Image (tube, rainbow, N blue to C red):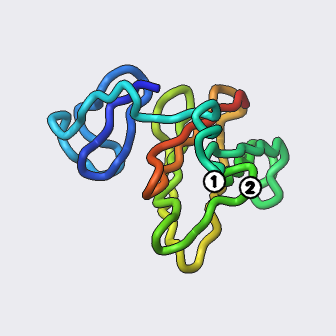
């Protein structure tokens, strides 16, 4: 899948253009490179023993904030992805309607390859992109 990747932090723009400034690290537009194969999808997993496609779970009722909040949980892989020094997930990025909304940084020593957000939005297309240190970026999408 095509995207514009930031050479500084690995953020990938999926809205069809490079931003004037990276929403993650602040790098200028000149730091972006267009890549036809910036992101892999579930159909690319057949070649690998590990699973990389994010699994998205949307909970309409938030247990923490109550009404007006939608919980979104994302884990990497239908079978949990390894979190080893030599093979791990670096971060998970969240997008709503192709616009970046959040990044969760992961450390392989103490975290599982998963993250969650509390959204104000009740509708739209949620995209989740994870970055594996060995196998690159992988995407999955879900309508809220």
Q: Nearest the camera: 2 or 65? A: 2
Question: Which residue is depicted at the point 64% across and 34% down?
Answer: 42
Point out residue 84 in the picture as x, y percentages from the top left corner: 54, 72
Q: Residue furthest bottom?
A: 109
**Vertically, is 63 above or below 17?**
below
Q: If you read the primary sequence from the N terminus, does the residue marked by circle 2 or circle 1 appear first?
A: 1
Judged by depth in the image, the label closer to the viewer, 2 or 1, is 1
Q: From mark 2 to mark 1, how far is it between C-alphas? A: 8 Å
On the image, numbered disc 1 is attached to which residue?
50
Disc 2 to disc 1: CB gap under 8 Å: yes
Residue appearing at x 71%, y 45% in the figure: 55
Query: Could you say whether the residue bearing mark 1 is in a helix, strand or loop?
Result: loop
Crowding at mark 1 (Cα within 10 Å: few <14, some 14-19, many 20+): some
Q: In which quarter of the view is residue 7 placed? A: top left
Indicate the secondary structure of the residue bearing disc 2. Answer: loop
Image quadrant of residue 32?
top left
Q: Position of residue 83 (x, y in %)?
A: 57, 69
For disc 2, the neighbor class at 10 Å (few under 14, some 14 to 19, many from 20) is few
**Residue drawn at x 28%, y 28% as measured from the top left:** 34
Q: Is residue 39 left or right of residue 139?
A: left
Q: Position of residue 95 (x, y in %)?
A: 53, 37
Which part of the image, by quadrant, shows the C terminus?
top right
Between 137 and 115, the residue placed more toward the observer is 137
Q: Residue tagged by mark 2?
A: 79
Left or right position of 52 against 62: left
Q: Position of residue 115 (x, y in %)?
A: 63, 58
Q: Is residue 141 above or below residue 75?
A: above
Count up the numbered dots: 2
Which residue is rendered at x = 48% and y = 54% of the image? 132
């Amino acid at each position: 899948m095509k995207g514009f990747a930031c050479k500084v932090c690995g953020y990938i723009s999926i809205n069809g253009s490079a931003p004037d400034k990276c929403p993650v690290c602040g790098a200028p537009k000149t730091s972006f490179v267009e890549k036809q194969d910036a992101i892999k999808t579930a159909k690319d997993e057949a070649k690998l023993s590990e699973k990389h496609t994010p699994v998205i779970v949307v909970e309409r009722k938030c247990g923490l904030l109550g009404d007006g909040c939608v919980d979104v949980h994302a884990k990497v892989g239908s079978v949990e992805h390894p979190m080893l020094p030599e093979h791990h997930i670096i971060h998970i990025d969240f997008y709503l309607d192709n616009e970046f909304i959040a990044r969760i940084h992961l450390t392989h020593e103490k975290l599982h390859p998963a993250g969650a957000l509390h959204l104000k939005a009740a509708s739209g297309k949620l995209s989740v992109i994870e970055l594996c240190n060995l196998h690159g970026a992988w995407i999955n999408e879900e309508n809220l």
